[in-house]
Image (tube, rainbow, N blue to C red):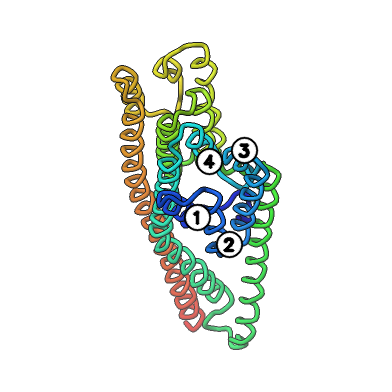
Amino acid sequence: MGIISPELSTRVLVPLCRQLATSYDAGIPILRTLEMVSKNTRDKQARAVIDSMGLAIRKGATLGQAARAEKDRLPPLMVELLASGEVGGNLDVSLRDIANYFEERQRMKRMIVGKSVYPAIQLTAAWFLGTFALMLIRRTSFTNTSFSLGDYFDFYLRFQGAAMFLLGSGVVTSIVLARLGMFKWIWGYVATHVWPIAPVTRRFAMARYLRSLSLLIGSGVPIVRALERAAATCANPYIEQDLLKPVPLVGQGATLVEAFAQSKYLPPVAREMLLVGEKSGKLEQSLNKAAQYQMDEAIQAVNIATRVGEVVISLAVAAVVGYIVISFYSNYLGMLDDIK
């Protein structure tokens, strides 16, 4: 469970869902499966969710009802797939789809983090080394004989302490705003409209949406409900709002292609795959292909964004080094003028 959202994190859901899928696929009844998974789960919050679902089933609830009772801590996609799989008699397939889906999301997150490590190290080093050198140049000169390195270190540590306090205050403020449901709108606007973050955000959001929609339709969820639940997986309120606009049109009998004609974020390739899927009767497969295409595009966008970030940070470091060198020689030449 994250500090921003009460929903279980992907890191926790990956082993949890895979254990559920493997145990149930081996022929173990769902109640016994939940008990086994609860014993093997290290995360306390995940164990509480599983135990609560097991208790509800013992009292006569269905698996779908037990999952919906935990909707604040379980992702909407997981709740819908569990319910539809139970009703349709293909719970084993639904559990495998859920496990595969969250494993894909975990790989996606690891890939993003891996691509971001080097730029983050560059930025951190640039901040600490750059501020140290800049302040040292400003506080010293060749004619200043009263300079104390110990006093400078004390001053520098106080400066960094104030900077870390401001950073921590920003993080705490972000968490509070997230708990109030406001931060997602602020960050969502930046992530949707500011380059180079926007291409990455849009493509990953569409990959999740199309993959989720494919799974929901394949599990027998009604198309209107599938569209609503799939939109919730985008993790971006602006894109989610855009993808929810076609839902009433589909409910009135419009085709998916007609309903999504005015969508700002659905890419042309996805529209073409919708058309092919509707005409061929293989909508699930077409959506899955479109999701894979968007994932490939998202990975390419991440590569471009990280390269751009590396170049920008390198240029910033070069500018700081250049300023330090110019300041050093300015002081040096000023000292020579004074001697003359």
Q: Is residue 269 visible?
A: yes
Residue corresponding to mark 1 = 16
SS for callout 3: helix
Cα separation, mark 3 vs mark 1, equals 19 Å
Q: Are marks 1 and 2 in contact (CB under 8 Å)?
A: yes
In front of the other: 182 or 19: 19
Q: Position of residue 88 (x, y in %)?
A: 46, 32
Q: Are marks 3 and 2 in contact (CB under 8 Å)?
A: no
At 60% from the left edge and 49% from the top edge, which residue is drawn? 7
Q: Which marked residue is nearer to the observer: mark 4 or mark 3?
A: 3
In front of the other: 65 or 248: 65
Residue corresponding to mark 4 = 235
Q: Amino acid at mark 1?
A: Leu
At 57% from the left edge and 59% from the top edge, which residue is drawn? 38
Q: Which marked residue is nearer to the observer: mark 3 or mark 2?
A: 3
Mark 2 Cα shell of 10 Å, populated few (<14), some (14-19), many (≥20)? some
Q: Which marked residue is nearer to the observer: mark 4 or mark 2?
A: 2
Mark 1 Cα shell of 10 Å, populated few (<14), some (14-19), many (≥20)? many
- Going from N to C along the chain, the mark reached first, 3 or 1, is 1
Residue corresponding to mark 2 = 43
Indicate whether 102 appears above or below 89.
below
Indicate whether 67 appears above or below 318.
above
- Going from N to C along the chain, the mark reached first, 4 or 2, is 2
Q: Indicate the quadrant containing the N terminus: top left, top right, bottom left or bottom right.
A: bottom right
Residue corresponding to mark 3 = 65
Q: Which marked residue is nearer to the observer: mark 4 or mark 1?
A: 1
